[in-house]
């Protein structure tokens, strides 16, 4: 019987509904070994020490031999010094290191070459023009190298996303998370889950096919049920973490708010280390929401400066207050700023009552929105007065003028952001809403499996669930999704 069941496992794995393997995506693009050979400058634009120009495609070897002397191909994957010249005129272009990566052992899976040339603009454009003159070669489109790597099964879709994120990573935490995704952790996890579903599906199909023969082992369906239950728990854990992974990728929303003149704009400028907002002694200076991306203690954040909250003002400032309140609702973390010397003013009291206390400063548990209360202008407090306001909710003293208290604030921000974004080396793996969508879809299908009275419907629900996991890593992905993901890349990657 079990041999029969394992035949079913492999049949379920291949079955008519099973998604296509992820190795033949991007039908608009040339398949392995066919089509044009592409070339591009892969290092950054502009004058530099060394620039790297790559080619990928069947004419790569020919291109390398056309430009170099001696004309023989260097040993695979070994850097060799060669004189480069224009094949049309014989004009010398540079003395450069060249590398030959015969497919499939290359980044794209195709024959690839690399020219490490001196990074002057004339050298780079000379080599690019020389490559363009070789028959069968054309300039690469943005992301085309990576797209070819994906087409040849060198990278899964989630690894491609990891690579895009790594190229765009601006903070340490983003880099760690991107590297984990590039290493294939999310893909491995999904494949493991998909395998579990394949086994559960095999059990259900075995029951459909053999239950009447009476030679089926006891508990075949129970086994499928228990696999599905375990999977539901695992998916639930990751889905609960999904917001954190997305925050880590695109930045947590940190909103600086408080009454007029508390020093909100001063704090935004201090944290972003640039003059983002106008600072002035005049209350009501900031009107629009000013947003700036910052690296806060290693975590990415979108920092928003807002208008001071107060009542009884003119229509323009009123609109500013309305925008500030709207932005406050979207905050992951509120940085509430009060003037330490002005706590009794109506605007301060009102802000404490309507924003700080409801958000539960210092006691964020049970509330998804977190808040840090900062008492600014501590330099104006009488000397020797360490904390003049022990009765206030937990708070930090700061002077934007002298910088005193900034280290403590950064430490507190780091803790808050770590809680919001998760630990990039062990924590959340779902970095895009696309990931969340497919995991939720998988979970919903498992719910349908449990409710299905009919075994054929139960089997279909398992196939739907497995289809979601497979689309997450790139099997059966649509062209639109691929276009969106590859759009993030630059030419030459
Ligand atoms: N002494 C002292 N003055 C400060 C400090 N921080 C800000 N100020 C001053 O307080 C005034 C208001 O600062 P802003 O940063 O414009 O305050 P704001 O909260 O953005 O004000 P609005 O945008 O008008 O709501 C300016 O004159 C700043 O120089 C501080 O730590 N100590
Ligand atoms: K001001
Ligand atoms: Mg301001």
Image (cartoon, grey):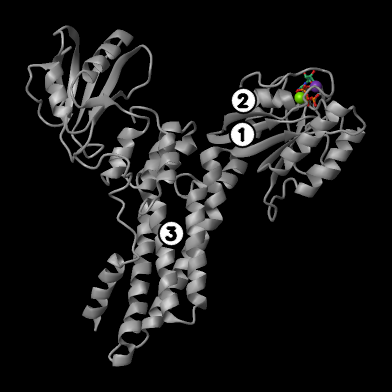
Is 279 displayed left or right of 271 in the figure?
right
* 74 shown above or below 87: below
Residue 161 in the image, given as x and y percentages of width and height: 41, 42
Residue neighbourhood size for the residue with mark 2, other residues' Cα within 10 Å, grouped as few (<14), some (14–19), many (≥20): some
Secondary structure of residue under mark 2: helix
Q: Residues within 10 Å of mark 1 (few under 14, many from 20)?
A: many
| Image marks 3 and 2: residues in contact by CB distance under 8 Å | no
Q: CA distance from mark 1 to mark 3?
A: 31 Å
Image height check: is 256 above or below 121? below
Give the residue at x 17% y 28%.
Answer: 60
Depth check: give the residue in front, 166 or 333.
Answer: 166
From the image, tell me which residue sits under label 1.
Answer: 302
Res. 416 image quadrant: top right
Residue 179 visible to an observer of this rendering: no
Q: Which of disc 2 and disc 3 is earlier in sequence? A: 2
**Ligand 1 lies under 8 Å from the Cβ of mark 2:** no
Res. 16 image quadrant? bottom left
Q: How many marks?
A: 3
Q: Going 37% across and 52% down the picture, which residue do you hit?
A: 187
The residue where tag 3 is placed is 468
Secondary structure, mark 3, is: helix
Residue 456 placement (x, y as % from top left) = 41, 78
Q: Residue drawn 84% across and 39% down?
A: 351
Residue 186 appears left or right of 441 = left
Disc on the earlier residue, 1 or 3: 1
Vertical arrangement, residue 381 with respect to residue 450, above or below:
above
**Pair 3/2: label in front:** 3
Nearer to us: label 1 or label 3:
3
Q: Is residue 265 visible from the viewing direction of this image? A: yes
Quarter of the image with the C terminus in it: top left
Label 2, on which residue? 272
| Helix, strand or loop for disc 1 | strand
């Amino acid at each position: 019987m079990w041999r029969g069941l394992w035949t079913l496992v492999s049949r379920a794995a291949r079955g008519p509904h099973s998604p296509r393997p992820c190795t033949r995506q991007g039908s608009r693009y040339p398949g392995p070994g066919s089509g044009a050979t592409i070339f591009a400058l892969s290092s950054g634009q502009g004058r530099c020490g060394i620039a790297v120009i790559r080619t990928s495609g069947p004419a790569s070897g020919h291109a390398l031999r056309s430009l170099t002397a001696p004309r023989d191909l260097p040993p695979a994957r070994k850097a060799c010094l060669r004189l480069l010249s224009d094949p049309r005129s014989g004009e010398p272009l540079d003395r450069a290191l060249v590398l030959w990566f015969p497919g499939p052992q290359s980044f794209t899976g195709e024959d690839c070459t690399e020219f490490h040339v001196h990074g002057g603009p004339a050298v780079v454009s000379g080599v690019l023009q020389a490559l363009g003159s070789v028959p069968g070669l054309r300039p690469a489109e943005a992301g085309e190298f990576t797209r070819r790597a994906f087409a040849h099964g060198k990278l899964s879709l989630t690894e491609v996303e990891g690579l895009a994120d790594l190229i765009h990573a601006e903070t340490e935490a983003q880099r760690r998370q991107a590297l984990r995704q590039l290493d294939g952790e999310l893909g491995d996890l999904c494949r493991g889950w998909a395998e579990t579903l394949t086994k559960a599906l095999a059990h259900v199909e075995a029951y459909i096919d053999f239950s009447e023969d009476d030679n089926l082992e006891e508990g075949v369906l129970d086994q499928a049920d228990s696999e599905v239950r375990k999977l539901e728990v695992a998916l639930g854990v990751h889905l609960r973490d999904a917001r954190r992974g997305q925050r880590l990728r695109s930045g947590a929303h940190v909103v600086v708010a408080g009454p007029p003149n508390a020093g909100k704009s001063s704090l935004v400028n201090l944290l972003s280390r640039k003059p983002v907002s106008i600072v002035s002694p005049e209350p009501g200076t900031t009107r629009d929401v000013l947003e700036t991306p910052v690296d806060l203690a290693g975590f990415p954040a979108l920092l928003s400066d807002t208008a001071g909250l107060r009542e009884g003002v003119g229509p323009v400032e009123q609109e500013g207050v309305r925008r500030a309140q709207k932005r406050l609702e979207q905050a992951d973390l509120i940085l509430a700023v009060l003037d330490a010397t002005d706590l009794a003013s109506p605007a301060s009291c009102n802000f404490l009552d309507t924003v700080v206390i409801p958000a539960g400063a210092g006691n964020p548990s049970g509330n998804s929105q977190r808040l840090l209360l900062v008492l600014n202008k501590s330099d104006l407090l009488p000397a020797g007065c360490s904390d003049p306001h022990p009765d206030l909710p937990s708070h930090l003293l700061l002077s934007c003028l002298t910088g005193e208290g900034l280290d403590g604030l950064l430490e507190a921000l780091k803790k808050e952001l770590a809680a919001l974004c998760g630990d990039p080396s062990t924590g959340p793996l779902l970095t895009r809403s696309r990931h969340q969508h497919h995991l939720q879809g998988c979970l919903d299908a498992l719910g349908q499996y449990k409710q299905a009275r009919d075994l054929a419907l139960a089997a279909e629900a398992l196939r739907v669930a497995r289809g979601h996991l497979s689309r997450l890593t790139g099997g059966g992905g649509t062209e639109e999704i691929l276009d969106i993901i590859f759009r993030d890349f630059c030419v030459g990657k």
